[in-house]
Every structure is written in C-alpha cells, then in structure tokens.
Image: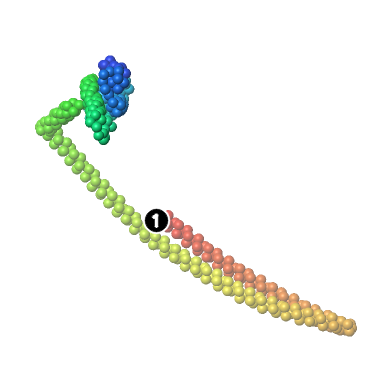
Amino acid sequence: MVTQDKFIELTAKITKRGKSCILRSIWLVSLPLILLIFAYLGFLDVLNFRVELHSIVMLSAIFVIYLFFMKHNAYYAVCKFRSGFLNIQQDLMQFINRNLLDIGGIQKASASIDDFLQNHLLTMRNDNFSSVASGIFPTLGILGTFISIAMSMPDFTSQSSEALEHEISTLLGGVGTAFYISIYGIFLSIWWIFFEKSGLSKLDLDINTIKYDTADLFWQKEEVEQVYFRKSLENYERLNYVFDNIASSEFTNSLNKTLEQRMELFEQIIEQELSSAKGVGIILDESRQKLNLFALQQRDLTAELAQMISSLKELTKNITQSSTTTNLQHQELAVQNGASAAVAKELAVSVEALNTTLQNLNAQNIENLYSGVVGNIDKLKSELDGLGENLSRHLDSLDEKVLKKLQEALQAVDKQTTQIISDFKDKS
C-alpha cells in the first residue's frame, strides 16, 4: 500500500516551479492588447496612424476570440497543473493503490502513468482548441481583411476625374487599413505558437519529473521481463535439480523399492479380496441352505394350516347340522303347541256349554257335569305334562349335542394351533 510520504519530495519539486496564473495570463494578453490599443489610438487620431472603423471592429472581434482560446494554451495550463498538484497527487496515490500487482514479492502498479496524467491534462485544457488556435487566427485575419475591403469598396459611379480620384484614394486607404487585420491575425498565431511550445516544454518537464520520481512505484516493461526471466531461470534450475535426482541411481533404487512395496501391498490386497470372496461364498451357501429349510418348514406349516381349515370346515358342517336338527325340533314343538291350542279350544267350548247348561241344572246334572269337567281337566293336565317333558327332553338333548360338538371343535382347534406354534418355534 502506497502512502502519502512517497510524494512529499515530488510535490515540493512541482509546486515550487509554479508561478501566479494571473501573471501568466497577463503575459499571454499583454502584446495583443497593446497592439489593439495602438489601433484604437490611430482610429481616434491620437497617433498619426489611420485605422478605419471596420478594421477596429474586426480587430476587436479577433481579440475577443483570442481571449476565449487563451485558457487552453499550454503556457496557462501548466500553471493550473502545478497549482493543483496536491489534488493530482492524491488521485495518483489512489490510482497506484488500485492497480497494485505483486510479482515475486514486490508490489507495484500495473498501469500506465502516461494515461493518468493525460486524463488530468484533459480536464485543464482542450487539446482540440489548442491545436486549431494557431491556424484560426491567420484565417480570421484574412477574413477580416476581405470584409474590410468589401465594406470600403466605392461604387465608382462618379463622372468627374476629381470625384473618381477621391474614390480611388478612399479605396486605397481602406485596403491599407484592412491589411492590419491580417497582420494582427498572423501576429496572434505566432504569439500563440510561442507560448504553446513554451508551455508544452514545461509540461514535459513536470511529467518527466513525476515519471522519474514514481518510477519505483510502477512496473516497467523491462522490469517485468527481468522478473519473468529470473523466475524462468529459477524454474529451470529446479527442473535441472529434479532431472538430476531422477537420473541418479539413488532415486532409481528408491523408485524400484517403492514399486516393490506397492506390488507386495497389491498382492496382499488381492489375497484379502480372495479370502473375503471365499468367506462371502460360504455365507451365501449357508444362507441358501437356511432358505431351503425355511421353505420346507413353510410348506409343512401350509399343510397344517390346510388341515386346520379342513377341521374348521367340519366344525361348521356339524354346527349346520345341529342347527337343522334344532329347527326340526322347533317345528315339532310348534305342532304340539297347535295340539295344545286345539285342546284349549275344546275346553273353552266345554266351558261355554257348561255355562249354557248351568241355567237348567239339577243336582244330578251338576254331578255329571262336574265329573266330565274334572275328567277333561285331568286329560288336559296329562297332555300338558307330556308336552313339557318332551320339550325339556328335546332341549336337553339338543344342548348336550351342540355343547359337545363345540367343545370337540374348540379342543381340536386349540390343539392344532398349539402344535403349529410349537413347530414354528422349533424350526425357527
């Protein structure tokens, strides 16, 4: 990183050469202004120097144009460059720090200082104006001369010789003063070129001073080439050292030894790979045998499951038969209920007949009727008792058969399930 201390001496050299810009402006405008003042004095008849009005106007116009171009003269620009060098020095320091390049441990700027200085000079003056100024002043002088001649040209319409002589003398007098404009333009061109070259030489001196004092801060083409060649020589030396080591017998023996060690290591790796492959083969065979055994066990298990399903089907069939038997018994009970209902109906008819005959009963009839009723009641009781016994007997037999079938089926299922679980545990 470049600091401001690097530019203290350079700044002192440049700034001490500077002079007042006002003084330089006075030098640039002094003689052209004096000549214009002489022309005004001649126009005012203060001096015995005849100048026409149109010539004064043309001379004044050329002088004003000269004042416009004066700030672009190198003689004036060098003053601005030196007085503002402190700002230029700050910009130069930033420019160097932005373009630092490290080559071989040395940091320098990898940019052109000429471009930097040229850019700053362009902000102080316009090179296009300064280059055309030396040619535009003579051109303006010639143009002003022709304009003055055209304005002083008489029409030559006089008939007398005296009037004609007056017009000719007027023409000659106007032409004489008109040539002052051309002379003034040529003088301004010479004056401009003189100070332009003087200013350029001073700018070149300052630029060379800056480039000389900052040469150690910028990479030069020769330095880069030297660094490149030095690095190349170092690389060549390293290559030679490497080649010498490669060509030596010690390196060859070391290389052969390393290769032998690598081959031994490679053989050990191959042996380990073969051993691993063999172990994997054994494991695969054992796995295949276990899978075959498991397949057989699965097949046995499937057969047992099929047997258990067959038993369940048999149980279902027995339950279905029991259900059919139960339905038949229920039908028989329904028939017996129908018979009981018929008996009850007959009893109701008998009771009704009894009620009918009670009205004309006598003792003998009552006794006969009582005997018939008691006999019917006894008969009904005996029939109902027989129906209850038949119903209880059928229900008991049905419950015992169904319960027995269910117990046998559950015991068979439990036994087969226990056997399957035991076989599966043994096989696994």
Which residue is at the front of the view, 83 or 406? Answer: 83
Residue 342: horizontal and vertical position, in percent?
72, 80
Question: Splitting the image into 4 quarters, where does residue 139 fall?
Answer: top left
Which residue is at the front of the view, 185 or 270? Answer: 185
Q: Residue at x 83, y 80 (%)?
A: 370
- Near mark 1 (Cα within 10 A), the count class, few <14, some 14-19 or many ≥20, is few
Tell me the quadrant of the picture where the C terminus can be found: bottom left
Which residue is at the front of the view, 53 or 364? Answer: 53
Q: Residue at x 18, y 37 (%)?
A: 261
The answer to whether 220 is drawn above or below residue 423 in the figure is above
Residue 208: horizontal and vertical position, in percent?
21, 22
Question: Splitting the image into 4 quarters, where does residue 167 fall?
Answer: top left
Residue 426: horizontal and vertical position, in percent?
41, 55
Residue 424: horizontal and vertical position, in percent?
42, 57
Q: Residue at x 14, y 33 (%)?
A: 254
Tell me the quadrant of the picture where the N terminus can be found: top left
- Circle 1 is placed at which residue position? 427
Q: Is residue 203 visible?
A: no
Is label 1 in a helix, a strand or a loop?
A: helix
Q: Is residue 297 visible?
A: yes
Which residue is at the front of the view, 399 or 316? Answer: 316
Circle 1: residue type: Lys
